Amino acid sequence: MDVIVIGAGVVGLAIARRFAIAGQSVMVLEQHPTPGQETSSRNSEVLHAGIYYRPGSLKARLCVQGREQLVAYCQERQIPHRLLGKLILATDEPGEAALAKLQTTAAANGVSLEDLSQPQVARLEPEVACRRALWSPNTGIIDSHTLMLAFQADIEAHGGDVVCHHRVERVMKQGDYWHVSVVDSDGERSQIEATRVINAAGLGALAVARSVAPALPDLPTAAYAKGCYFGYSGQLPVSHLLYPTPEPGGLGIHLTLDLNGQPRFGPDVTFLDNDEPDYEVDPARAADFARAVQTYLPGIDPGKLVPSYAGVRPKVRIAGTLADDFVLSTSLAHPGLMNLFGIESPGLTASMALADDVFEQMR
C-alpha cells in the first residue's frame, strides 16, 4: 500500500479519503466491527465555529477552515446537518468577564460573535436565565454517522479499503517499508506493508505509538477525560444550543439538540486514572447535572434527566503539561510515520481540514 491509516474514526476516514482521492492506494485498519465506535460516536455532534481555541493553534485554524469545508460537503452530499446557532451564557460577573475574553479570542481566530443583552437573549430563548450572552450563528449540529459513511464511500469509490475487526499489534520499519502487524477477530495474524503509516487511532493512538520499532522517544502520556451525557424525558421550549462559560478541561455542561430536536445535556469532565475507556453513566450524577443546568435554564425538571451515554476525550500531557492543541507528530528518525495525539474536540468539525494538513505533510 502507499498509505495505511490506523483508526476509522471520523479523522482517520477523512485522512484516508484525502489520500485516496489523490490517487494513493489506501487501507484503513479498524479494531472494532464498524467505524467510529469510540470518540466519533460519543460526542455532542456539534459543528463548532472556532471560538475557544488559542489563536495560532491548529485547533483554531483547522476548526474555522474545516467548518466551511464540512458544511459545503454536507450540502453537496445531503448529509443531515443544521446551523442552529449557539448562545454562550454568562450568569454572573465572572461569567461576563469570561465572555469578553472569549469574544477577543474568537475575533483573533476570524470568528464573529454578537454580544447580546439579557432582553435580547429573552427574545431568542424566553426560558433562559443570564446576564449577557454571545451569539454564534455559525455553530450547528451534524449527523456524524452519515458523515462517516460518506467518507467511507469516497474511500472505496477511489479504490481504498476500510478493514474492520483488525487490531494493530506492531508497527516496524524494515528497509523502505513499514510493516504493520495485525490480528483479526479470529486471532489470525497477518502483516501489511506500506510506504507511509498514519496513526489516527484516537484512544488507541498511544498504544500504537508504543508498539513502533525502532521505539519512538518522548511520547506523551494519557490524560483521558470522561464526559457523561444525560437525556431529557420531556419537551423543552429551546431552539438553539445553550452553553455556559467554559470550565477547565471542557466547555461546561451544555444543552445541545439532535436533528430531531431532542435535548441532551453534557458532557461533564472527569479525568481517568489510566487510558482504559469507561463508558458507564452513573444515574446519581443527575443531581450535579441539574444544578449546573439550572443556572441558565431554571425551568428544567431534574426528575426528567435520564442517563444517556458517555465519551472519552483522548487528551494527552506533554512533559507533564496538558496539551491544548492537536499534536501531529513526526520524526526524522521515522520517515513515513505520523502519529496523531490529542485529537479531541473540535476534531469532528476540523476533520477535512486536518486531513488536508496531514496530506500536505505526508504526500
Image: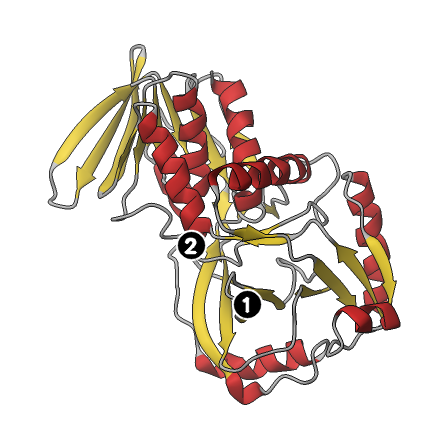
- Compared to residue 52, the image places residue 20 above or below, namely above
Q: Give the x, y percent position of residue 240.
A: 67, 64
Left or right relative to 235: residue 112: right
Label 2: which residue? 41
Work out whether residue 98 or residue 231 is closer to the camera in this orientation and state it.
231
- Compared to residue 18, the image places residue 335 above or below, namely above
Q: Earlier in the sequence, mark 1 or mark 2?
A: 2
- Compared to residue 288, the image places residue 112 above or below, namely above
**At numbered mark 2, what does the secondary structure look like: helix, strand or loop?**
helix
Q: Give the x, y percent position of residue 187.
A: 12, 43
Which label sits on residue 12? none
Work out whether residue 105 or residue 129 is closer to the camera in this orientation and state it.
129
Left or right relative to 57: residue 1: left
Badge 1 vs badge 2, beta-carbon distance below 8 Å: no
Q: Amino acid at mark 2?
A: Ser
User: Which of labels 1 and 2 is toward the front?
Assistant: 1
Label 1: which residue? 261
Which residue is pictured at 54% across the width and 51% down the height?
81
**At numbered mark 1, what does the secondary structure look like: helix, strand or loop?**
loop
